[in-house]
Image: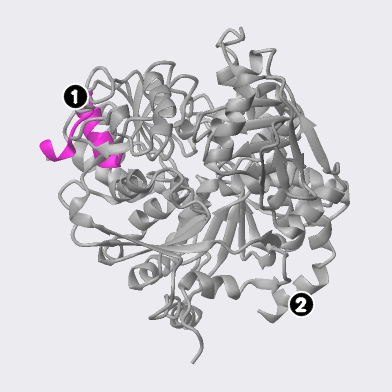
């Protein structure tokens, strides 16, 4: 089923300079009881955003000066549980790109399967990105999928890796399942021959 | 002669349906496990596309994450949880998938059920929408966790798209010391290489310290591969593996079994095969371990002190380190030994097999729990529960003042009502000490079943070697 297409994103960014952010923080287990993919954004980073009585905490998502479709986070983002609900929550909240110096494998796959681009940058570039946002929260970051390049307003930029197949999928809104379904006959033959 | 291959590469290569430059491999899955939390959206996807399950016989369903651990014969009280379990019932019926529902003698935590039923066999590829699928690697399988979109891929085509990960060998040689068990080995390794130390790799565990472990202990090791970021971890099958499988419900029987064992004996890494990375540890360096922080890499020997921020190798980690200690209510540079705990949780796909319960029973037999602790023993499956009763372990637990509950994931992730209250400390045999993992604001110390049992008796963090 076709998903939204990703081209170039120019946006403000939300900084989260914490390492090893696990998917239990992104979406705590008690919010995994839904049987649809919708509405998880409401509980994104729930326990960092809200107190038990639902009053907001001092957290970056509650700070009006930070906004935008890009989340910038410390290394090993998305570790832990394989719950795709974490990717759904990030997308549903409105993010389309996550920038970090390191992503956990399963999260990376889940994000790519949900029209969200994980951009892996060097530690040095990540530091510069945090510094640029700290200096000016309204600063705009540009993520160019076609040229695999992420740039800051001062012109500092870095290229990032993405495999050719996933790049095509994101750029065109293709879906892995459509591709696999087209191979059902081949798979049947493989299964019989085993 | 062909190029020497690792065990991982042998299994991977045997499951490639299609390979294309720049594309991920179309990777065939032998065994697919599903549970109530990560499957409903995948079935919904099939419905929207008008697609059937490709091969229903290769998928097995069991509710575990979100089930109560008391009064399982009654309807689930909480509406959303009930709906989720009912949805699994409806979906498996509609799509012709086998379900071991609540109350069924085979119900339990998915990663405990698969091996004990003989559904997990050497050389297989196994996936489940759960990161601890790596558990099945103990049988010499490529087993890993996937997201729900991938669950939908497997249901609709029995394949997923995968890039081949790099390979890492972790070799542990030598003899384990007194009071040191599999959980300590893996907590030790993760503390050495960090929670992201094996990201991008598939690990093969080797060395005589691994070879000497039972299947239950090997499962504990492979289970926590994901906690160092690895896609999965596997151990070459041997006689211990073949003996474990023999006679299990869905395992090959009789002549079929003998034929299979002959095949499985080929499942090992060839001499001279290259790994992308090799790490070696000495079993004698390992002691009973405990975590102090909020990721499984933050572990120490139970007799050591918590490091100070200044001692961290990487200065950039200080912020996260300080945040973690603040959450845990602990001071840098102090000892955990003697710290009072409020709860003891013995359960989860890491440590809720019969051998784990036996370890606990050995320590607590004839003793009583400390007054300040509440102790929950949650067996990994109905079969484990039944075996525990047969061996009289239930009596030992009862006399000690422990609560023996019914099978499920329980307080490992606290999706059901088994939650550790805010601010309370729990010594837990599970796999994750993340913030809020065992309930909002709960504080987790990960440790072995032996260390958990010792804490249950003393009411505080204890070196198990001091009481046996």
Q: Is residue B33 above or below residue B426?
A: below
Regarding residue B8, the answer to whether it shows in the image is yes
Snapshot quadrant of residue B425: top left
Q: Which image quadrant: the C terminus of chain B?
A: top left
Instruction: Using the image, tell me which numbered label, if any, was put on residue B36.
Output: none
In this view of the protein, which residue sits in the foreground, A125 or B113?
A125
Nearest the eye: A29 or B196: B196
Position in image of residue B441 (x %, y %): 46, 19
- The residue furthest front is A154
Same subunit: marks 2 and 1: no
- Percent position of residue B16, x then y: 66, 72
Q: Residue at x 51, y 73 (%)?
A: B252
Q: Which residue is mark 2?
A: A189
Q: Is residue B450 magenta?
A: yes
For mark 2, give the secondary structure.
Answer: helix
Q: Mark 1 highlights which residue?
A: B338
Disc 2 to disc 1, how far (Cα)? 62 Å
Which secondary structure dominates the residues rendered in magenta? Answer: helix
Q: Which residues are magenta?
A: B447-466
Q: How many marks?
A: 2
């Amino acid at each position: 089923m076709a998903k939204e297409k990703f081209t170039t994103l120019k946006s403000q960014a939300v900084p989260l300079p914490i390492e090893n952010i696990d998917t239990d923080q992104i979406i705590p287990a008690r919010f995994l009881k839904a049987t649809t993919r919708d509405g998880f954004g409401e509980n994104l980073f729930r326990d960092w955003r809200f107190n038990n009585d639902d009053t907001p905490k001092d957290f970056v998502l509650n700070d009006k000066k930070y906004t935008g479709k890009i989340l910038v986070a410390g290394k090993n983002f998305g570790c832990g549980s394989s719950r795709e609900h974490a990717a759904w929550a990030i997308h549903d909240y409105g993010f389309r790109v996550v920038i970090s110096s390191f992503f956990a494998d399963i999260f990376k796959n889940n994000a790519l399967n949900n029209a969200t681009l994980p951009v892996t940058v060097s530690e040095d570039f990540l530091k510069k990105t945090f510094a640029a946002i700290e200096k000016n929260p309204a600063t705009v970051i540009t993520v160019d999928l076609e040229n695999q390049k992420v740039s800051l307003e001062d012109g500092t930029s870095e290229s990032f890796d993405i495999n050719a197949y996933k790049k095509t999928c994101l750029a065109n809104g293709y879906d892995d399942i459509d591709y696999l379904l087209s191979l059902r006959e081949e798979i049947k033959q493989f299964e019989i021959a085993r | 002669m062909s190029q020497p291959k690792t065990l991982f590469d042998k299994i991977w290569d045997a499951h490639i349906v299609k390979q294309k430059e720049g594309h991920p491999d179309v990777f065939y899955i032998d065994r697919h496990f599903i549970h109530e939390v990560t499957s409903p959206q995948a079935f919904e996807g099939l419905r929207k596309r008008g697609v059937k399950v490709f091969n229903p016989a290769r998928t097995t369903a069991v509710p575990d994450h979100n089930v109560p651990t008391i009064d399982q014969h009654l309807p689930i009280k909480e509406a959303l949880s009930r709906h989720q379990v009912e949805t699994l019932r409806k979906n498996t019926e509609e799509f012709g998938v086998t379900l071991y529902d609540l109350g069924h003698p085979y119900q339990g935590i998915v990663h405990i059920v698969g091996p004990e039923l003989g559904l997990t066999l050497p050389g297989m590829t196994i996936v489940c929408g759960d990161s601890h699928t790596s558990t099945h690697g103990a049988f010499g399988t490529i087993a890993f966790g996937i997201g729900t979109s991938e669950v939908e891929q497997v249901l609709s085509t029995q394949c997923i798209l995968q890039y081949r990960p790099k390979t890492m060998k972790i070799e542990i040689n030598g003899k384990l010391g007194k009071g040191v068990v599999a959980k300590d080995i893996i907590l030790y390794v993760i503390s050495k290489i960090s929670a992201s130390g094996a990201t991008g790799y598939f690990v093969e565990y080797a060395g005589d310290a691994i070879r000497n472990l039972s299947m239950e202990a090997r499962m504990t090791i492979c289970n926590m591969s994901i906690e160092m970021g690895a896609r999965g971890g596997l151990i070459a099958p041997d006689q211990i593996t073949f003996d474990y499988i023999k006679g299990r419900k869905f395992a090959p029987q009789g002549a079929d079994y003998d034929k299979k064992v002959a095949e499985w004996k080929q499942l090992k890494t060839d001499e001279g095969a290259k790994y992308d990375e090799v790490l070696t540890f000495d079993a004698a360096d390992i002691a009973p371990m405990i975590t102090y922080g909020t990721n499984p890499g933050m572990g120490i020997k139970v007799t050591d002190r918590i490091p100070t921020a200044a001692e961290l190798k990487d200065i950039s980690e200080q912020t996260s380190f300080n945040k973690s200690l603040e959450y845990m209510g602990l001071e840098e540079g102090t000892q955990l030994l003697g710290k009072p705990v409020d709860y003891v949780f013995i359960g989860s796909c890491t440590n809720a097999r019969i051998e784990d319960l036996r370890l606990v029973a050995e320590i607590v037999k004839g003793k009583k729990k400390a007054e300040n602790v509440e102790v929950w023993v949650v067996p990994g499956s109905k079969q484990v529960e039944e075996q525990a009763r047969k061996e009289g372990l239930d009596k030992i637990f009862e006399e000690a003042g422990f609560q023996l509950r019914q099978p499920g994931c329980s307080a490992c992730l606290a999706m059901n009502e088994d939650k550790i209250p805010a601010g309370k400390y729990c010594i837990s045999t599970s796999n994750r000490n993340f913030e809020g993992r065992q309930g909002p604001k709960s504080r987790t110390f990960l440790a072995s079943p032996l260390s958990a049992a010792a804490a249950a008796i003393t009411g505080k963090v204890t070196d198990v070697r001091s009481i046996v």
